[in-house]
Amino acid sequence: MTAPKYNSAAKYNYNPANCYKDRIRLCIFIVSVLCSFYILYLYTSSEMKEQNDRSSLNYTMPWFRIPRKDDDKIQLDQIEESSFGVHFVPPNDVFIPPDWSEEEMKYLPCLSRKCVCGYFKGKWKNESCIVRKGIKLQRAYRQEIRTLSDEKRKRWEKMLNELKTSGVFSRLARNHKYSGVHAGPAFLLWHREFLKRAELIYRKHMGPEDINMGVPYWDSSLDWPLPTPKHSIFFSKFLVGEVDEDGLVKNGPYHNWTTIEGRPQILRQFDKVEEGELLNDARIKWLITNPDIDMIFGASRPLVTCSNKKHLDPRMFELSHNYVHFFINGDMASSHGASNDILFYLHHSMMDWVLEFWRRNMQTRQQRESIYPVSDPNCYPMWHFAESFMPMLPPFTNRMGLSNGYTDEMYEFAPRPTCTKQKPDCGSNYLFCYVPSNQQDSPYCVSKVRLGGNCTGFEDHPVCFEAKCLRNPDAENEFSCQEKILNA
Ligand SMILES: [Cu+2]
């Protein structure tokens, strides 16, 4: 018996066609393994890059007092419950439908003085609207609240208290509560239009001599440099009121204001939310000279599907605005409750200043009325699109909010308080001119501190309102505003 001839083909069931297939399979296997490694490499490197980018984007001074990182995008399943305009409302909320009177519906959408003249019972002649006592209706003048004379500010506070008592202020608050639009490009323009309408109502209820008074703005960057901004004179009985240990407004012109939710006082629980921070000069300048429209109109919390921005810069417009709401906290921290507090109007008047100066610095007149972020459903819901209607603000679409009519016809802004070495005066008893001891830095205006408040770091400056900045007997290395002791 001869040994069978070695037949490798038989042993391995060799068939040239099978061999060819095997090679192809092997090739496919090798290619797919290589591909997987490559994909894995790409994925991990982009993840790492993103991680690296995120950790390197650690914003602190001069932008923020506390280190801040980029925000996260909104998951698709959160779209309905997010701040995208669907406000969270407490479960026990008693719904009173928001509305406008017939007269308000007729006049408040106006974007010219001619159109709105009838609201003030004025007469249109020689291209002017003449109202009571022969006074001419002009653009409303919005100025920093601390630069108003005490008499004028008191008349404004009296008017607001009358509107609170008559229910008009609460009706306005409900219009924001149930329809305000946030977290997308429509945010700025919805609030611009809402504030314009509120301002017209306020003007109508002022005496004829104050008919051209606009909603004052609260420039919170004046309080930002203080060691404890909540001790600013702004938060005292002289201006917007002080709070008790529970955060309830205990004095000032707005105490005992029952909120639309029925709480007998407005709530401001400072320091409870970590993200809270006032505006500052560095971020304001960065915003008003920013060439990137996404930093102004961009979605503060775009959907995860939005490819537009990888990171959410914490200095962007809406986020910078949000931190002020969080700083005040209490009613201001919730989108449904914020409009209970007069601070909402003062803060939005300031944010509208920022918007307007960005428009003037970075756009031509024609661009201001035409450029709006793309209507991208991957980034935000359709009520943020250019042609969508503004909820509760008929007949306005978002695009109409770009009109130059707002500042051509309806209101203008006084400059923010400034001072120089030659003229170290900020035009208000509630502000002082901080002149740095070194020669390089320019002087700037800062709010004064109320009695008992922390004035550390400013002890050589006129920082205390009707008091003196002295060593705090209760705390080492701390100074506080104390009553001047005569003959001491
Ligand atoms: Cu709002």
Image (spheres, rainbow, N blue to C red):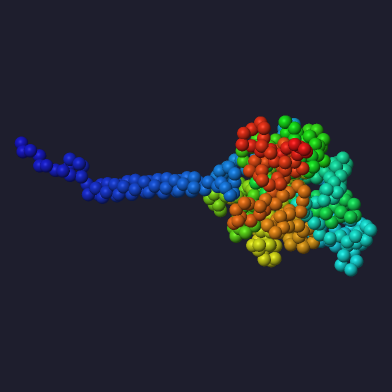
Residue 127, relative to residue 23: is it above or below?
below
In depth, the one of 476 and 225 nearer the eye is: 476
Looking at the rendering, which quadrant does residue 352 occupy? bottom right
Residue 80, relative to residue 194: is it above or below?
above
Residue at 93% across, 61% down: 134
Q: Position of residue 36 (x, y in %)?
A: 38, 46
Residue at 85% across, 42% down: 161
Q: Is residue 267 visible?
A: no
Residue at 59% across, 40% down: 77
Question: In this image, 466 relative to 77: left or right?
Answer: right
In depth, the one of 335 and 277 nearer the eye is: 277
Q: Position of residue 429 (x, y in %)?
A: 77, 48
Q: Residue furthest front?
A: 487
Looking at the rendering, which quadrant does residue 451 occupy? top right
Question: In this image, 146 relative to 271: left or right?
Answer: right
Residue at 87% across, 54% down: 210
In what quadrant of the picture does the N terminus appear? top left
Q: Is residue 320 visible?
A: yes
Q: Position of residue 200 (x, y in %)?
A: 83, 53
Residue 402, relative to residue 303: is it above or below?
below
